[in-house]
């Protein structure tokens, strides 16, 4: 068969396949948390579940119908000052390079919104945050959204 191009974006960045699979991942993570909470407390499974819950809220309030873009994540970051300097974004070079490296860019300057931020990429972008910071960011974002609606 034909060889795959060396720098190809992962299928998870495409919008349609991502929507169904995201709820499957959330369902499995929630099931793991509910069935064996003592095993997952402080674990990667619990962490992923927390980040996916936050990603869902960002998805519901995204700026483009196609999906979450980096500008949406920057909007999220602005809600909680301590998180602003710790959330990383993908540079244009990293996107053009097929996401082999990154995210490394701070949210200053222009963000490249060609990329649809799936759950895997969102986890990568928030990797430098502690579990507590993820929870505080989630709470601050929900408060900000509520204030915007009033």
Image: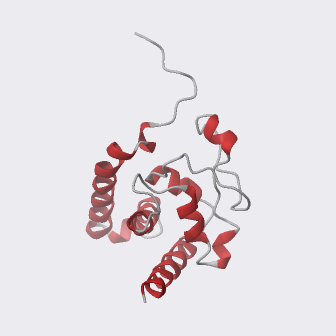
Q: Which residue lies furthest to the top in this view?
A: 1
Whether residue 15 appears in this view of the structure is yes
Q: Which of 26 and 17 is in front in this view?
A: 17
> In the visual, does 25 lie left or right of 113?
left
Q: How is the image coloured?
A: secondary structure
Spot occupied by residue 91 in the image (x, y as percentages of width and height):
68, 47
Disc tally is 0
> In the visual, does 59 lie left or right of 83?
left
Question: Which image quadrant: the C terminus?
Answer: bottom left
- What residue is shown at x 53% (from left), y 30% (from top)? 8
Residue 38 location, quadrant:
bottom left
Spot occupied by residue 144 in the image (x, y as percentages of width and height):
51, 82
> In the visual, does 19 lie left or right of 3?
left
- What residue is shown at x 48% (from left), y 83% (from top)? 148
- What residue is shown at x 65% (from left), y 46% (from top)? 102
Q: Which of 80 and 63 is in front in this view?
A: 63
Q: Which residue lies furthest to the bottom in this view?
A: 150
Whether residue 130 appears in this view of the structure is no
Q: Nearer the viewer, residue 130 or 42?
A: 130
> In the visual, does 112 lie left or right of 106?
left
Residue 134 sits above or below residue 92 on the image: below
Spot occupied by residue 108 in the image (x, y as percentages of width and height):
73, 62
Question: Which image quadrant: the N terminus?
Answer: top left
Spot occupied by residue 86 in the image (x, y as percentages of width and height):
67, 65
């Amino acid at each position: 068969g034909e060889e795959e191009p060396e720098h190809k974006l992962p299928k998870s960045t495409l919008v349609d396949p991502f929507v169904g699979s995201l709820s499957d991942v959330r369902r499995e993570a929630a099931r793991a948390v509910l069935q064996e909470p003592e095993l997952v407390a402080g674990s990667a499974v619990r962490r992923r579940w927390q980040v996916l819950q936050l990603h869902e809220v960002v998805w519901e309030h995204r700026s483009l119908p196609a999906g979450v873009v980096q500008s949406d994540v920057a909007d999220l970051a602005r809600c909680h000052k301590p998180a602003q300097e710790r959330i990383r974004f993908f540079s244009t070079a990293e996107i053009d390079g097929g996401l082999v490296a990154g995210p490394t860019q701070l949210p200053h300057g222009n963000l490249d919104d060609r990329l649809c931020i799936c759950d895997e990429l969102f986890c990568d972008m928030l990797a430098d945050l502690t579990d507590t910071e993820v929870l505080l960011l989630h709470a601050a974002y929900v408060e900000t959204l509520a204030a915007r609606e009033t």
